[in-house]
Amino acid sequence: MTSVRRHLARTLLGTVLALGGAGTAVLLFAARDAAVDQFDAALRAKALAISTLTAPTPDGVAVAFTDHFLRGFDERNPRDFFEIWDAQGRPLARSESLGQGDLPRPARVRERPSFWRQRLPTGRPGRAIGLSFSPKPAGPTQAGAPVWLVVASDSTGLNEDLWQLIAIAAVSGAVLLAATLWLIPRALRKGLQPLDRLGERTAAIDSHSLGTRFAAADLPAELRPIANRLNDLLGRIEESFERERRFSADLAHELRTPLAELRSLVECSLQWPETRDPAEPQEILAITDQMEGIVSHMLALARGEQGQIPVRSEPLYLDRLVQDRWARLARGAAARGLTADLQLDPTSVTADPTLLQSVLDNVLENAVEYSAAPAVLRIRVQTKAGRAVFSVENPAPNLAAADVPRLFERFWRKEAARSGGRHVGLGLPLARVFAEAMGWQLAAALDGAASLAVTLAQARAGPAPAAG
Amino acid sequence: MRVLVIEDSVRLQRTLGTALRKSGYAVDLSGDGESGLWLATSNQYDVVVLDLMLPKLDGWGVLGGLRQRKHDVHILLLTARDSVADRVQGLGNGADDYLVKPFALEEFLARVQALCRRAYGDKRRVLMLGDLEMDTLRRTIRRAGRDIELTSREYLLLEYLARRTGQVVSRSEIESHIYDEQVDPMSNVVDSAICCLRKKLGGADQAPLIRTRRGFGYVLEVDGPVCA
């Protein structure tokens, strides 16, 4: 189907023309039959009148009326004709209008009238009725022998009426055809305008106008579901595009500084070789490591946001894992003047060990890195309402309440600086994505004493705590 | 010419400092906005290279702080922000130039040099001072058809005096524009440098270009017209 409008136009035109033609034909036949029936009724009345006025005589029959009684039978205005034969076919009576001519005698005539078309002696078309009857005498004598009567009338007027009817029907049909040809395309164009506008607006949507939305309420009921689905689809595409754009922009932005470092380092060495630092290869390696870290974190985040992180669930002890991850950081924390107040209740969970370990590392490293020092970090593993909960609390006097929701934003840092490239602001966002991929929740809260609590909790109750 | 680089990336700070020093500039480095603003307001710099994402006080704060104090030092913004809106905001807030990371070192140096020229209201590339010809792009000196080899610091001193031809330039002005914080202010580096420069510039039969105005400083004077 190339065009709905063309298809509809063809179908409607065909249907209207077929129905109109059929209707006109039916009307035409009905009108013709009615006219012929009326004509035949008149013919029958004339035949009955003649049969009533016909009386038997010794020589045959006598018709007791003059042709002037029924003007049509007059020879001066011959429009009606009759002729009577006896059973042997001998003519007994005839109308003056026949003049020298004869009506053709039918081979067989019954009492029940029969009608047929008849070419008249005048050469004009006509219809005829034939019937058989026994003339009745005026007195109480027996009826005469049966005779055959044929009455014919000029049907020129009837034919003219019928042709006129056909002409009217043809003109009406032509007018109907013209009106249909004129009206249907316009009606379709007008009726399909909302669809055209929807199509045009849809065609105009490109990657720069994904914010376009259709006002479904203003559309006809048939198009509303389409507009609603299109709006949903556009919303999802826009979100996806925005995510990709943000990913590219964030990535490009974060890579600019290490790239600038790398380029200026190399250019400087090439232009002034005597300034080359022996540690330069290590510097270059560190920069490329940093860039690699940014790219891998960003890709992991992007995959996480698209729900593409594979999760392998297996039973493990959360308290032991926390103990193990903290042991890695304890020495560095002590160097900063940080100690841990560990309260780890035995807690078994079902989770992806790699993802969970990554989340724990991120949260613990974040606390060690950003906690005010000296301080005691309160590290807890507990079971609350059947849910395993891990939390770390550390003093964060520089953090404002408004900063807390931003902790999980990509590339957000309390200070916009890069701090020598060690932190790019992806740790906590990535930890949250990993937690959500496992069906856990990672949240942060700041209490009145400027203590930041980061909590990792199962979204649903897990297995009962096990000793051990 | 003295340049202040305010950049929190230690690596970038180091390479930019090296490149600028090798190109003959006196360079001071700062790793955060607060100390950068303090340095910029405490010393006389010809150009400040300013990163926007800085700890303690970001680049916008430094830029605003300098302009609020009516400090007209030329500022080159060096940033990873590459959108048109960022550039417009940077230039609209009083920056003189904008360079997006990563950049070619050559372009960076050319922009710093262009800003230095603007600092003295002189956009000529080649300075003709009598029989002395200075190509500020190639950093070459010729006098009476003879090429003269200068160290980068000597060249810088000569260009500074040449940009202010006919004006007396004090010793402290020279110190603050040509020497960075690494130089001891009590030393006689300026006198020594002027002495060396005179020797290299002046032949036995040539008139001295740099004259001493006792109690005031030095002045570079030529008998003929100064032209491009």
Image (cartoon, helix red, strand yellow):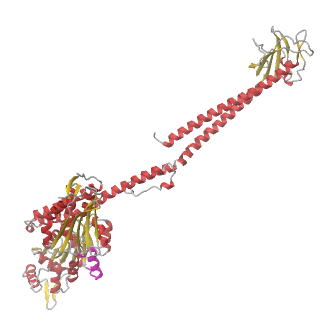
Q: Residue furthest right?
A: A139
Quadrant of the frame with the C terminus of chain A: bottom left
| x then y, percent, for residue B185 | 12, 85
Q: Is residue B128 visible?
A: yes
Name which quarter of the figure residue A253 lies in: bottom left
Observer-nearest of B40 and A237: A237
A264 and A416: which is toward the camera: A416
Q: Position of residue A299 (x, y in %)?
A: 24, 56
Residue B222 visible here? no
Pick out the residue farthest to the bottom.
B215
A117 sits to left or right of A268: right
Does the magenta portion include B60?
Answer: yes
Locate residue B148 relative to residue A233 in the image: left or right. left
Q: Nearer the viewer, residue A288 or A410?
A: A410
Q: Which residues are magenta?
A: B56-72
In magenta segment, residue B223:
no
Q: Relative to residue A301, is residue A145 depicted above or below?
A: above
Looking at the image, which residue sits at the far front?
Answer: A467
Quadrant hosting residue A281? bottom left
Question: Where does residue B88 sit, x and y in percent of width and height?
Answer: 32, 70
- Viewer-closest of B139 and B49: B49
User: x, y (%) of residue A16?
Assistant: 59, 37
Q: Residue at x 71, y 32 (%)?
A: A165
Q: Is residue A363 above or below residue A165?
A: below
Is residue A456 shown left or right of residue B27?
Answer: right
